[in-house]
Image: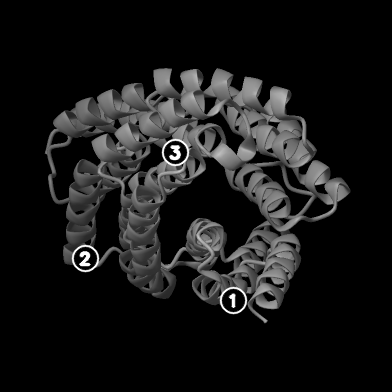
């Protein structure tokens, strides 16, 4: 084996990791591909490590099929060598690919395998990935517990690392989604800002800004939220960061957020749909369909709206995304109420209550309960 060639591969892979850390994804992929070309031992740990990290980069740019293929190859190589640490890294990469693609059941199975392999020093990493999956499925209580465990592991006496930034940002996002007190949300968001500055992690700051945008939206500062979402949409687009784009488009494409008029909101929803289709992401595509269904409902085309919302509901049921399922049911119920089909409306709203309870939506539970009561009284 050419030792100097392997060393070059190691050094170039380190450069790839630097770009991956800073979310310079195209550069990360480039350096990992170059590093791979220097690796002489195609079944060795360096090669499988490079493949797993490249898989993560391809996942973040939305090329899920390429990311998944690389992650699976990395896992196979690690299994053949009996290398548990590299198996864990490969399982992590493959689970991340499956999650962002929308295959949550597949991601859960992979994470269960990864948990059995994870060494003690990587337990917090497993918790971080599992928490992210819970957040995507709007299982906020479970996600909060895991994120707090990550922070407990990385005690306050240790310097911040990327995992603590992610944990604080996710806890802030969970707080926004579940109606937590603003002081708690600001604590986690401000801590994430501080740690990004401490680590000189500029791209992490962009994620802080998108979480801040969602907080502005919750607090009713629509113009500032819109300004941030639109600004960072173009930044994420330039960096080919599909996950960042998704966060911005979830804000801009939802007619209930009242960011724009119907025409402009429809354009953002169609852009969301286009990105979802290009990435072949079931989650993004179906979220966009729900947004379009809500917009068409406002325009008065009930049949088309019901068709889109029903399709979205079926897909979200398959993925088991609780809050999105509830939103589909609530929107469909509103259409049936408008058509004076009150029994259908009440049935959908009652089913949505169980889902809202599952994802800790206290305000929505109270609102939908009032709607059910009002509709029930009309039928008497």
Q: Name the residue under label 2.
A: 79
| Label 2 element class | helix
Quadrant where the N terminus sits is: top left
Q: Residue 350 carries which label?
A: 1
| Labelled pair 1, 3 in contact (Cβ < 8 Å) | no
Percent across and percent down for residue 366 are: 76, 67
Distance of label 3 from label 2 (alpha carbons): 30 Å
- Choose the circle earlier in sequence order: 1 or 3: 3
Q: Which of marks 1 and 3 is in front?
A: 1
Figure check: 55 above or below 346: above
Q: Which residue is drawn at 44% across and 30% down?
A: 266
Figure check: 175 above or below 37: below
Distance of label 1 from label 3 (alpha carbons): 33 Å
Front residue of 295 and 103 = 295
Q: Which mark is residue 243?
A: 3
Distance of label 2 from label 1 (alpha carbons): 48 Å
* Picture quadrant of residue 154: bottom right
Figure check: 32 above or below 75: above
Percent across and percent down for residue 111 are: 40, 67
Label 3: how many Cα within 10 Å (few below 14, some 14–19, many 20+): some
Label 1: how many Cα within 10 Å (few below 14, some 14–19, many 20+): some
Label 2: how many Cα within 10 Å (few below 14, some 14–19, many 20+): some
Is residue 377 at least partly visible in the picture?
Answer: yes
| Labelled pair 2, 1 in contact (Cβ < 8 Å) | no
Q: Residue at x 31, y 26 (%)?
A: 12
Q: Which residue is drawn at 79% across and 39% down?
A: 219
Percent across and percent down for residue 311 are: 32, 58
Say left or right for 201 vs 217. left
| Label 3 element class | helix
């Amino acid at each position: 084996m050419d030792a100097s060639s392997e060393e070059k591969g190691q050094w170039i892979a380190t450069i790839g990791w630097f770009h991956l850390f800073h979310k310079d994804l195209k550069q990360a992929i480039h350096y990992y591909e170059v590093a791979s070309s220097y690796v002489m031992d195609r079944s060795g740990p360096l090669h499988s490590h490079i493949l797993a990290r490249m898989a993560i980069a391809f996942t973040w740019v939305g090329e899920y099929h390429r990311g998944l293929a690389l992650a699976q190859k990395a896992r196979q190589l690690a299994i053949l060598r009996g290398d548990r640490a590299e198996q864990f890294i490969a399982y992590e990469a493959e689970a991340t690919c499956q999650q962002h693609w929308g295959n949550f059941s597949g991601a859960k199975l992979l994470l269960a395998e990864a948990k059995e392999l994870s060494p003690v020093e990587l337990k917090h990493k497993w918790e971080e990935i599992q928490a992210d999956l819970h957040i995507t499925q709007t299982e906020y209580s479970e996600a909060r517990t895991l994120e707090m465990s990550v922070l407990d592991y990385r005690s306050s006496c240790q310097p911040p690392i990327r995992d603590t930034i992610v944990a604080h940002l996710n806890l802030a996002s969970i707080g926004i989604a579940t109606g937590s007190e603003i002081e708690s949300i600001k604590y986690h968001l401000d801590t994430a800002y501080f740690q990004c500055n401490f680590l000189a992690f500029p791209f992490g700051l962009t994620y802080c800004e998108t979480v801040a945008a969602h907080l502005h939206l919750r607090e009713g500062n629509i113009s500032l939220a819109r300004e941030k979402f639109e600004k960072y949409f173009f930044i994420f687009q330039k960096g080919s960061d599909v996950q960042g784009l998704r966060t911005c488009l979830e804000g801009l494409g939802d007619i209930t957020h009242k960011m724009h008029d119907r025409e402009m909101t429809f354009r953002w929803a169609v852009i969301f749909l286009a990105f979802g289709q290009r990435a072949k992401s079931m989650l993004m595509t179906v979220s966009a369909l729900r947004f379009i269904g809500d917009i068409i409902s406002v325009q008065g085309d009930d049949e088309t709206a019901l068709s889109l919302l029903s399709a979205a509901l079926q897909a979200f049921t398959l993925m088991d995304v609780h809050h999105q399922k509830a939103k589909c049911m609530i929107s469909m119920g509103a259409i049936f109420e408008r058509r004076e089909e009150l029994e259908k409306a009440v049935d959908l709203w009652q089913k949505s209550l169980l889902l809202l309870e599952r994802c800790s939506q206290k305000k929505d539970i109270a609102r939908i309960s009032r709607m059910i009561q009002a509709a029930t009284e009309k039928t008497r």
